[in-house]
Amino acid sequence: MRTLLSATESTAAQTAAQTAAQTAAPPVQPVQALQAALAAEHAAVYGYGIVGALLTGTSQAAARADWEAHQEARDTLEAMIVKLGGTPVAASAAYQLPFTVDSAQSARRLAAALEDGVAQAYLGVVASTEATLRTFGALAMQPPANRAAAWSGATVAFPGMGDSRPP
Amino acid sequence: MLAASATTLPLFAALSACAGPNPLAGPPPLSAGVRSLLQAVTAEQNLIWIYKRTMVSYSALAPGLAALLAEHQAHLDQLRASIVEPPGKTVPATVTSKPAVPGTPAAAIAQLRAAEQSASTAQLRRLAGASPSLAQLYASIAASEATHVTALSALANGTPH
């Protein structure tokens, strides 16, 4: 079982994302960064299944829409990785949750954490030196940053860079 | 400052014929990356100015805008920290755009939203040619500004973010 927001899933992304701007982060390999983003999308698809089960009404509808958005993003990443000659990483059968999720409140918190993880993974793609991939990563991290803000009720100054959110 | 007059030109011509750096040539021109960074700093300063003026003009909006303003200040601090300044020089704190605050709160929020959207788009144009870490900073700030657009829309609609 893999941890839902595992550091090992997005090594490239986190290495780059946690680096202060004034330090020299090494460029990442495109396929490696895309694989990290795909792993984060797999985790989000799994996690939203739990989130949705604990919500009702419009919140559940929002969770469903976000779940579908992550499925679409996953498919996009898989196609990109194949096009680059890689083999897309597979989803795990199950993931270990980062904290107990047993209420609507904790489900919202999980959704925000999932989105933060996805944004962080896409920020790893931005560390690529390939211009098209950079732009792709920068644009792809905006929807998860927005969804994280929506679920948590607050924006952060630096999406994808590990800004902490209030519990 | 030396002027390129008829009397100084032969001196410069002679010096430029020598190999190695010219000690009289002054500081080297700014690289494209540094110019881009300075533009990002100015853009943040402009945004901060608009937020502050809007909050002064419409105090009822201030609680909803304070967090966004604080995030822009954090952006500015991080961008400025990324600039390696020569000894004795500082990054200018110049605001280059000072639009008038619109006549209604709704229009003021719309102006902020447009400024945020424009700033986010401009950050993406800075990605090419930036170092990986600086590109990530631009991308993260662009994403932050994208969340501000959404937050301002919610504020305009009176819905909780």
Image (tube, coloured by chain):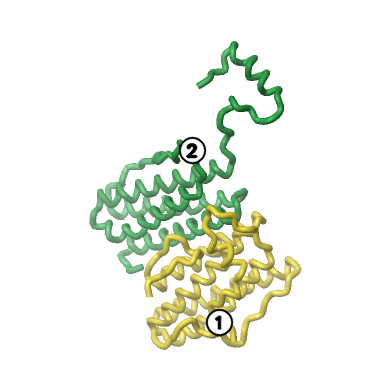
Chain colours: A yellow, B green
Residue wearing tag 1: A3
Mark 1 neighbour class, 10 Å CA radius: few under 14, some 14 to 19, many 20 or more: some
Residue B60 against residue A143 in the figure, above or below: above
Which residue lies most toward the top here? B7
Q: Chain of mark 1?
A: A
Position of the C terminus of chain B by quadrant: bottom left
Question: Which element is circle 2 on?
Answer: loop
Residue toward you, B66 or B103: B66
Residue wearing tag 2: B87
Q: Residue at x 59, y 83 (%)?
A: A2
Side (left or right) of B17 relative to A146: right
Q: Which of pointers 1 and 2 indicates the residue nearer the eye?
A: 2
Kind of residue sitting beneath label 1: Thr
Mark 2 neighbour class, 10 Å CA radius: few under 14, some 14 to 19, many 20 or more: few
Residue toward you, B119 or B11: B11
Residue toward you, A8 or B51: A8
Query: Residue A64 at what x, y percent from top left?
Result: 49, 79
Q: Residue at x 48, y 63 (%)?
A: A159
Kind of residue sitting beneath label 2: Pro
